[in-house]
Image (cartoon, rainbow, N blue to C red):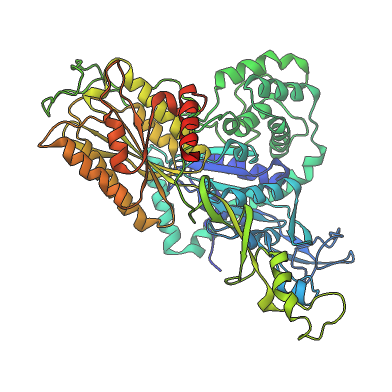
Amino acid sequence: MTTPFPFTAVVGQDDLRLALLLNAVSPAVGGVLVRGEKGTAKSTAVRALSALLPEVAVVPGCRFSCDPAAPDPGCPDGPHEAGNGVDRPARMVELPVGASEDRLVGALDIERALAEGVKAFEPGLLAEAHRGILYVDEVNLLHDHLVDLLLDAAAMGASYVEREGVSVRHAARFLLVGTMNPEEGELRPQLLDRFGLTVEVAASREPDQRVEVVKRRLAYDADPAAFAARWAEEEAAVRQRIAAARALLPQVRLGDGALRQIAATCAAFEVDGMRADIVMARTATALAAWAGRTDVLAEDVRQAALLALPHRRRRNPFDAPGLDEDKLDQTLEEFSGESPDDDPGPDGGGGGGGGQPAPDAGPQGGDTGARPEEGEGGQPQPSGAQEQPAARASEPFRTKALSVPGIGEGAAGRRSRARTEHGRTTGARRPQGALTKLHLAATVHAAAPHQRARGRSGPGLVIRRDDLRQAAREGREGNLVLFVVDASGSMAARQRMSAVKGAVLSLLLDAYQRRDKVGLVTFRGSAADVALPPTSSVDAAAARLESLPTGGRTPLAAGLLKAHEVLRVERLRDPARRALVVVVTDGRATGGPEPVALASRAARLFAAEGIASVVVDCESGPVRLGLAGQLAADLGGTAVTLDELRADSIAGLVKDVQGASRRAA
């Protein structure tokens, strides 16, 4: 067995270690989500925690790790009689990003259930993790339905598997730990709320601390056993402290004063629902037990807020994480007189462990500086023309639904039609591999003609393996939405670029809600640039958009060709994910020989390959040339104006009605 890196040897990351230890003391806290850049010891700390957990007693031979002192009466391997068990180390189970639903919750053998009447259940990872740790690396890359199943089991303490009327339930209580890199996309706010605590981690910028990290890692790699032996005493001390805190936890008193501070804090930060209050109460209680106290103090409430509230304040992916600590201190101070037991001091140390989470110091967009304005219009300008200052985006709005025609088989999402494992049943087919979703009517229809030959003359059916039919389902997929944005001088006139950025920001929000990947190509001057390669992080695209400068000529052909190249590379990486190209332009093309003809030829490449496209027509003013419409025709797509892009647009509604009338005629 590989020797894990010692938990106490992790350098820094006080908040991460404290959050993990609090969950080890009180699993009811609800787990922890660790957010941070790559290479910050997220996985190392989680794996190291499992070695600190006390051993668990289990019923011999039970695949569901039942406690011999109080066996689960509904255990599929039961019933068990209470008695002596065997001790084993607490498990840490890892859920791979590509895991199937059956691998997570377990698999029922439908074929045996129908053909033999046997309820054969193969436990999944939730059963294996019972009374241990379930670790999900890159949790933001899991399919949404898997995350839903995972968090529902964590909340209820049980897992339910139902297939065609056959049902199995088993206990599933575990410490849930997820790690993610925000650069690769965010979790939905509803899913963020299901994690008890969250921690932001980042690599230290202190040279001495970085040196110590490298020294310890090299020493561990050279001789893991010897390195672990050096930290054995510290590991034993933390293990004993966890056990002592667990024993003390039932005696900790959460007074009315502390409860009022918790409620006031959640109300002050306008978090949704009551889960935040409950998690804060459990966390503050665990902090007191970890400190060896039986009373919850204001410092415990403060530290609990810093761990339990930041991720619950996010309303959309563009909100910065973090908590206003001045506002937190002010709220605690205001309600500090409600109980004489509570200490109103704002600088508590979190019950004996961990520093405070660093306030968000993420970039707020580049400083573009003041630049002289250029003249607008579609006239050719020198390729070295100066940039105009980056315009601020207007307020985002709800956009019309854009989709890719046809039916795909890409990653689960919410945009375009696709063949999926989940969704409405559209037909039946012979199973390819293991049967997962039985189409009962089709199975009976296939078996019925053979009953006499199988010796069945009375009621009932004899069903054989060849009769079984898999349900074919249709749902929605996520797409690659590639934005091709005109940032030339003709787009910078008056307030047009502000409106354009607001429209793209609105489409980015729509892409986030529909679980798309996004990419951003811009063109201006004499060339086109990939401002953001395809990614699941729409907030990264929003940051690039915010600092986007404008000015210069309009190399439309270069922008289209650059987008075509991005799609070619992305098809090699992810051939199942279909693309939707959104070209944001007024349709003008300037610079170089025959710019209009060149742009038309580049556009026809997309039409020839059947790539779905939409042109957002940004042309304004009383005289319009209609160039965006011509570009949409060359692309084989459609054109919408900025006004028509709004979901509540009257102009868009009229256009939809007229289009429907023409199709009906």
Residue 359 visible, this orientation: no
For the question of whether residue 317 can be seen, the reply is yes
Image: 85 above or below 13: below
Residue 596 as seen in the image, left or right of residue 91: left
Residue under the image location 89 percent in, 64 percent down = 82
Residue drawn at (71%, 70%) of the image: 445
User: Which residue: 63% across, 37% down?
Assistant: 193
Q: Is residue 558 above or below residue 443?
A: above
- Which quadrant would residue 303 be assigned to in this image? top right
- On the rendered structure, is 594 left or right of 198? left
Between 378 and 622, which is closer to the camera in this rendering?
622
Residue 188, relative to residue 116: is it above or below?
Answer: above
Against 596, residue 122 (above or below) is: below
Residue 626 percent across, percent down from the top left? 28, 28
Tell me the quarter of the picture where residue 483 sits: top left
State which quarter of the image contains the N terminus: bottom right
User: Hey, which residue is sitting farthest front in the picture?
Assistant: 665
- What percent of the width, then of the height, locates residue 207? 36, 40
Q: How many marks?
A: 0
Residue at 73 percent across and 52 percent down: it is: 173
Percent x, y of residue 564: 28, 47
Indicate the position of residue 198 as horizontal and vertical percent values: 58, 38
